[in-house]
Amino acid sequence: MKLPPAEFMPLVSELRGLIEQARRHVAQTANSTVTMLYWQVGLCIRREVLNETRADYGERIVATVSRQLVTEYGKGFAEKSVRRMVQFAEAFPEEPIVATLSQHLSWSHFVEILPLKKPLERDFYAEMCRIERWSVRTLRERIGSQLYLRTARTKQPEALVDAELVKLRAGGQMTPDMVFRDPYMLDFLGLPDGYSERDLEAAILRDMERFLLEMGAGFAFVARQKRISVGGDDFYLDLLFYHRHLRRLVAVELKLEKFQPAHKGQMELYLRWLDKYDRAAGEESPIGLILCAQADTEQVELLDLGSANIRVAEYLDKIPDMKLLREQLHRSVQRAREQVALGALPPVSEPDGEEQ
């Protein structure tokens, strides 16, 4: 293929940009239209079923309608697909919400989300897909790793979770409890037996891309072994990140041992130094994450780390039994919510998501 003269290359480059932008817009519009069509099909059938009292009517109408639609429009309307469309309309009954999500999520995204049983869990993954622009593959991995149950906010009463999702849906505003997780899955680092904190840090730096994927969208790496000079002493922060959505620095300390109360004082020193010397105009106060091999829930609660802008989370360096992990996380969430209900634990933040 003969290349155009160099003098025309800027014009060709500009035209390429216009064409690619138009193609993306067409694809997005087509996806949104198809998704809304499937929702409307499901809604119409569901409305028809609800208006009928005969017990077997729902089964018969889906099968009958599906056969006719397949004849006229192809296999995309097979009985299994039509049932999924009805399920779609049941799980997401509000048209404005579906219309907004359809601008960002494909039908394949919804196919992954629909099997989830809890409405809050479905809403969480849908909104995180929209905000963080997950691919279908990423969504599948996040669901498989129990991200919803590992998010700090889910350990609060369901009313607070719902309020946070409403705020996220309305303005895309995220809070630390929607960002931080517990535990973090670091099995991809391939750490050997008997590794040190320096080995863990080095492994994270070697595989920073996958570490950032596990941390979540919005994190940007800033520094390793950040020097903190206080008086005549130098201290070194393991890792420093910046989070775009939270608009704040995130200090990360790595601990091979079980969480100790002394770790709080160390992190508080780092956060106050960062707040005084590194915090830029318009940024929120820095926040700290202590990643440790194990953490005692009662110790963490009594230290009231949330008020100090500190989060504690365990990390798993080996692939866990996901069924057992899910059961443990369910118990942890239920226990935390019961303690909040009894007044044993204060909610991490108010329903409007504003930090105190």
Image: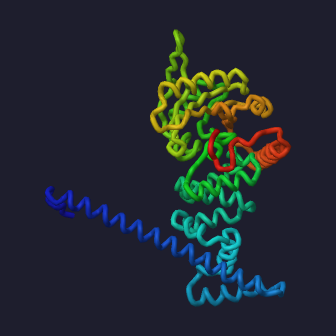
Judging depth in this view, the residue of 208 and 280 nearest the camera is: 280
Q: Is residue 103 above or below residue 228?
A: below
Give the image location of residue 54, x and y in percent. Answer: 83, 87
Give the image location of residue 4, x and y in percent. Answer: 17, 61
For the point 69% across and 40% down, which residue is it? 183
Residue farthest right in this picture: 342
For the point 67% across and 28% down, which residue is it? 193
Q: Is residue 86 above or below residue 240?
A: below
On-image quarter of the N terminus: bottom left
For the point 59% across and 63% down, which residue is it? 109
For the point 80% across and 32% down, which residue is it? 298
Q: Is residue 312 visible?
A: no
Q: Is residue 39 visible?
A: yes
Judging depth in this view, the residue of 62 and 196 nearest the camera is: 62
Give the image location of residue 336, x and y in percent. Answer: 79, 43
Q: Give residue 107's quadrant in the image.
A: bottom right
Residue farthest top in this picture: 232
On-image quarter of the C terminus: top right
